[in-house]
Every structure is written in structure tokens, then in C-alpha cells.
Image: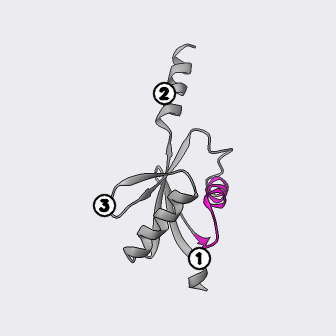
């Protein structure tokens, strides 16, 4: 039933995945699905962001952020929650720093 889930589209680089997120999912379940779908070992070094009502990408880090994301999607009457998986800038810097010492 459509009322039991949210539609989610998440992009990672050029790759995009759509899935249904049950309405009772919390941030932890969302992260687990993203890890599974993109075949990522873990989320260390990655961030999930959502597209807000000002068309800006906002960091999604906890249940409260997910609630806000859902509220914005509901109030804007969008059918799909848009997310982006990004490599953390801090992780990218530390990777580059460690590689430059080789």
C-alpha cells in the first residue's frame, strides 16, 4: 500500500537508485539500505544529504534530520524524497594526505 512507505531516490556520482522506505524506518534503517544498495562496506567517510524546500542539499545525520526531511517532502507535496550520497570532505582530505606521504 502506498501509504505505508516513502519513495526515495538516492544518487551517488552518476549512479541513482530508487527504493521504498517504510514509514516506520529510522535513520539507522535508511543507512543500512543505502549501504546494501550501493554495496558499501560501511558509511565511514560518507554523508547522506537531502534536498530541502529551498533546493539546497542538507546533511542528514540522525532521526531528527530524517523527520525534518520527511516533513519537508510532505509539505511540498513531492512524491519522492531526494537524497545524495557523498564522500565526506574530511575523509577525502585525510585520504589525499595519507597518499601524498607514500
Q: From which residue to which does the magenta span run?
A: 20-36
Check the image and report above or below for 73 versus 47. below
Residue 70: x percent and y percent? 49, 68
Q: Nearer the viewer, residue 65 or 22?
A: 65
Name the residue beneath numbered marker 1: 5
Name the residue beneath numbered marker 2: 93
Label 2 packing within 10 angstroms: few (<14), some (14-19), many (20+): few
Q: CA–CA distance between discs 1 and 2? A: 37 Å
Is the C terminus in the top left, top right, bottom left or bottom right quadrant? top right
Name the residue beneath numbered marker 3: 54
Left or right of 17, for residue 36: right
Residue 26: x percent and y percent? 63, 63
Label 1 packing within 10 angstroms: few (<14), some (14-19), many (20+): some
Q: How is the image coloured?
A: one colour
Q: Nearer the viewer, residue 53 or 16?
A: 53
- The numbered mark, 3 or 1, whose residue comes first in the sequence reads 1
Residue 24: x percent and y percent? 64, 71
Residue at image x 54%, y 74%? 6
Is the N terminus in the top left, top right, bottom left or bottom right quadrant? bottom right
Q: Secondary structure at mark 3?
A: loop
As drawn, the residue found furthest toward the left would be 54
Left or right of 34, for residue 78: left
Q: CA–CA distance between discs 3 and 2? A: 29 Å
Check the image and report above or below for 49 versus 71. above
Q: CA–CA distance between discs 3 and 1? A: 24 Å
Check the image and report above or below for 34 versus 42. below
Residue at image x 51%, y 20%? 97
Q: Secondary structure at mark 2?
A: helix
Can the viewer see residue 37 in this picture?
A: yes
As drawn, the residue found furthest toward the front would be 64
Disc 3 versus disc 2: nearer the observer: 3
Amino acid at each position: 500500500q502506498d501509504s505505508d512507505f516513502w519513495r526515495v531516490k538516492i544518487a551517488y556520482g552518476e549512479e541513482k537508485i530508487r527504493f521504498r522506505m517504510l514509514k516506520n524506518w529510522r535513520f539507522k534503517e535508511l543507512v543500512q539500505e543505502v549501504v546494501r544498495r550501493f554495496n558499501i562496506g560501511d558509511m565511514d567517510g560518507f554523508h547522506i544529504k537531502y534536498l530541502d524546500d529551498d533546493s539546497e542539499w542538507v546533511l542528514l545525520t540522525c532521526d531528527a534530520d530524517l523527520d525534518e526531511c520527511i516533513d519537508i517532502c510532505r509539505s511540498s507535496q513531492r512524491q519522492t524524497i531526494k537524497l545524495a550520497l557523498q564522500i565526506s570532505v574530511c575523509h577525502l582530505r585525510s585520504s589525499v594526505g595519507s597518499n601524498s606521504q607514500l
